[in-house]
Amino acid sequence: MKVPRVLAIGSSLLLVFGVIMTFNWMISRSLVYKMSGAAHRKHADLKNAIKRTSKPHPKRKKTTVQGKTRKLKQPVLKKQPRVTFDKLNSKNESGKSYLSLLDILKAKNQPKHGKNIFFLQTTGVQKEETLQLIKLTAREACAIESAALHNPGLTVFVLFAGATHRMYSGNPWIRSLNFYKNIRLRRLNLLRYAAGTPIEKWIKLGKIYKSKYIFPHASDLLRYLTLYKYGGIYLDLDVVVLRSLEKMPPNFTGAETSKSLACGVMKMSSTGEGHQIAALCLQDLQANFNANNWGSIGPAVITRVAKKTCNTTRIQAMIDKPSHCKGLTVFDAKAFYAIPWRQWMDFFRSSSLNKTLKATSNSYVIHVWNKFSKFQRLRAREITAYTKYARTNCPRAFAAAGDFF
Ligand SMILES: *[C@@H]1O[C@H](CO)[C@@H](O)[C@H](O)[C@H]1NC(C)=O
Ligand SMILES: *[C@@H]1O[C@H](CO)[C@@H](O)[C@H](O)[C@H]1NC(C)=O
Ligand SMILES: *[C@@H]1O[C@H](CO)[C@@H](O)[C@H](O)[C@H]1NC(C)=O
Ligand SMILES: *[C@@H]1O[C@H](CO)[C@@H](O)[C@H](O)[C@H]1NC(C)=O
């Protein structure tokens, strides 16, 4: 009975082989499942970010659960939203992908003279560039979105002086900016950016990098430098734009109080007097910079320059008689700073809603004083002046933020 023995050995070998193959197949199946699940969760995150859900914090966990249940119903990934940011996609060894921000000086789409809105994010600025991911809060994304939404004829540049990359799938409110064709995220290196401008030499001295307040000081400096280089509108990241700024006069700034102008909302033209004003600001800044004084080169710069340009020390006189200011328009506080910084809480309290809406009803922009308000947690469903304005002027960022804004 030799034949059956050979058969028995052969068949048991076959059996073992079969078991191994089946096992392998099962493992690969479960991996595929896991992977498609991850892709789906990502997609669901995105959809949830767009569709406002009112689930309690923490929102990330909830959307993941929803993504899982939805998986069975719609197994095919829908089209991702169009990515408008110029991108150089680089895969990291760790498998995470980053998009490197284009350098503003090298990017193909350069700012057009005067047709720009600029935001500046200077966190992490240093002499030598290092890989840093962009950070924007939901409120900052709101400022950017509101500017893009109300000014389709202008290009919104968000300039990062420290950050160099963004996550391919960053947080939902950053992704929500992808929907606007007129937003560009760019990076810059201060030394190279200042080349060929009146402040080049001074930057090379390196004083700014030794400042006790380097991030705010770099932001002060860069706003005047950017307006000098390209012309256009500069906006702080703690604003909400309420209406179009496209028909605003060619050179303007706003009063904050009866004694001081502010520099959170300004426009200067890239030629003529406006350019001259920006040049004067750069001069003033070098003369008055103090590494140990937070306020040495912010609003103080434009206030001093306007006093000189308008030949008056009285802010009200600048507002009343624009003809004395060589084409620099000075708006009164209602335009951009209707709520003074001491009352910043008014934006965040429902009891101040009516009063605040009334005070800002003719404003172009509200300025919410991030320096004080950034620690103020705010429930998105609370009815305050800030949530009310955000809901209509930055609908996507607001929705993407989740329960807290
Ligand atoms: C990947 O990450 C490491 C540190 O985690 C960083 O040094 C490297 O530059 C990154 N690569 C890319 C292409 O972003
Ligand atoms: C500036 O104003 C003063 C009076 O307040 C006047 O005497 C002077 O001529 C003015 N200068 C210019 C350049 O207009
Ligand atoms: C502001 O900008 C314009 C446009 O470049 C410039 O020619 C002018 O001198 C400034 N003032 C006014 C009123 O246009
Ligand atoms: C705010 O105004 C609305 C109507 O415009 C009114 O119903 C509401 O009571 C007011 N709220 C406060 C706190 O005054």
Image (tube, rainbow, N blue to C red):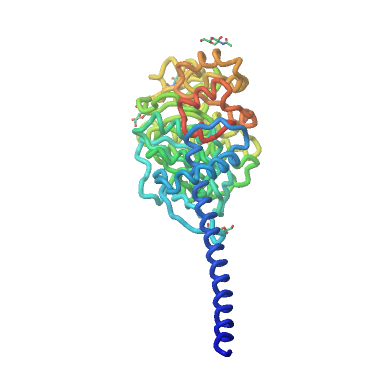
- Which residue of the protein is positioned furthest toward the front in this rendering? 1
| Image quarter in which the N terminus is found | bottom right
Q: Residue at x 42, y 35 (%)?
A: 117
Q: In this view, does 153 lie to the left or right of 397?
A: left
Image height of 288 relative to 202, above or below: above
Q: In which quarter of the image is residue 341?
A: top right
* Of the pair 32 and 41, the residue shown nearer to us: 32
| Whole-percent x, y for residue 89 in the image | 45, 55
* Of the pair 138 and 224, the residue shown nearer to us: 138
| Whole-percent x, y for residue 152 in the image | 36, 33
Please tell me how many numbered marks the rendered image carries.
0
| Image quarter in which the C terminus is found | top right
Q: Quadrant of residue 258?
A: top right
| Whole-percent x, y for residue 140 in the image | 53, 35
Q: Residue at x 48, y 32 (%)?
A: 235
Q: Which residue is drawn at 42% across and 26% down?
A: 252
